[in-house]
Image: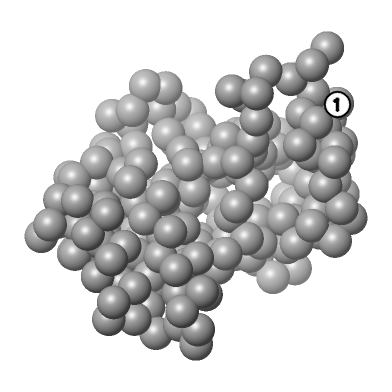
C-alpha cells in the first residue's frame, strides 16, 4: 500500500534541537510584526541568532519560525514570560505539533512507557518505533543509516533539553505549571498527550 504523499513525515528537525534560545529571540520579533516572513528577514539581516555562516543562520531561522508558527499568540506571549522549564515544555509541544513523527513518538512511546511505569527510554525504543513507521512511510524506509541515527540523536537531545529525560535515559515526569497545562489542554485533542504525565483532562 503506497503512502499518501500528503501524509509524508516532515523530517527537517535536525537543525538545532529544542531551540529555546532561538525562540526567545524570534518570538518578540513576531509579536511586534505579526508576519513570519519579516521575522525571518530580520533574523537573516541582523544575524540575530549569531550563526557562524549565512546558510546556517538561514536554516536555523527557517526551523525556529516553522516551530513557533504552530503556537498561538497567547502561547508566544507566555513563552516570553516563561521560566526555563516552562519554555522547554512549550517548545517540546511546538516540536510535537510541527512534526507528526515527533508527536507520535511522544504519544506512542514516551508517554506510553511512562504510563506503563517503564522507567527508561532507550535507543532500541526509537528503533522499533522507526521500523514500524517505515512500513507505511517510504520517506523513512529510504533514509540512510546516518540520517536515521541523526534523527534519533536529535530527538533524544530534545527530550533532555525539555527536562523529560535524563542523560542516562530515565524518563522524568513532566511537572507542568498551571498556565502551561491550561494552554496545552485548550487544544483538541489535548497536547498533554505529548508528555510523561498523569491522565488527560
What residue occupies the far left of the structure in this picture? 32
Q: In which quarter of the image is residue 110?
A: top right
Locate the C terminus and report the quarter of the image it occupies: top left
Q: Position of residue 164 (x, y in %)?
A: 56, 56
* Residue 19, picture quadrant: bottom left
Q: Residue visible at 48% across and 42% down?
A: 98
Residue 94, percent across and down? 42, 47
| Residue 137 position (above or below residue 81) | above
Instruction: Between residue 129 and residue 160, name the one nearer to us.
Output: 129
Quarter where residue 64 is shown: bottom left
Residue at the spot 57% in from the left edge and 64% down from the top edge:
15
Q: Position of residue 46 (x, y in %)?
A: 27, 81
Is 196 positioned to the left or the right of 63 in the image?
right
Residue toward you, 25 or 123? 25
Q: What SS does tag 1 mark?
A: loop
Rate crowding at label 1 as few (under 14), some (14 to 19) or many (20 or more) other CA atoms within 10 Å. few
Q: How many labels does the image show?
A: 1
- Left or right: 144 as drawn, with respect to 158: right
Residue at the spot of label 1: 135
Q: Could you say where residue 89 lies in the image, as x and y percent from the top left?
A: 42, 54
Amino acid at each position: 500500500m503506497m503512502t499518501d504523499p500528503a501524509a509524508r513525515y516532515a523530517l527537517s528537525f535536525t537543525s538545532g534541537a529544542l531551540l529555546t534560545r532561538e525562540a526567545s529571540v524570534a518570538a518578540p520579533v513576531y509579536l511586534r510584526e505579526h508576519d513570519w516572513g519579516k521575522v525571518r528577514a530580520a533574523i537573516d539581516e541582523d544575524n540575530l541568532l549569531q550563526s557562524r555562516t549565512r546558510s546556517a543562520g538561514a536554516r536555523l531561522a527557517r526551523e525556529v519560525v516553522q516551530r513557533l508558527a504552530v503556537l498561538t499568540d497567547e502561547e508566544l506571549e507566555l513563552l516570553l514570560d516563561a521560566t526555563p522549564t516552562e519554555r522547554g515544555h512549550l517548545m517540546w509541544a511546538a516540536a510535537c505539533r510541527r512534526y507528526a513523527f515527533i508527536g507520535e513518538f511522544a504519544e506512542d512511546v514516551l508517554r506510553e512507557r511512562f504510563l506503563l511505569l517503564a522507567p527508561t527510554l532507550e535507543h532500541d525504543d526509537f528503533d522499533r518505533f522507526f521500523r514500524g513507521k517505515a512500513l507505511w512511510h517510504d520517506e523513512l524506509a529510504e533514509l540512510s543509516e546516518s540520517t536515521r541515527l541523526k534523527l534519533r540523536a536529535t530527538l533524544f537531545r530534545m527530550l533532555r533539553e525539555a527536562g523529560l529525560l535524563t542523560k542516562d535515559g530515565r524518563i522524568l515526569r513532566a511537572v507542568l505549571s498551571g498556565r502551561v497545562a491550561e494552554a496545552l489542554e485548550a487544544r483538541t485533542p489535548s497536547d498533554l498527550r505529548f508528555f510523561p504525565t498523569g491522565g488527560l483532562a
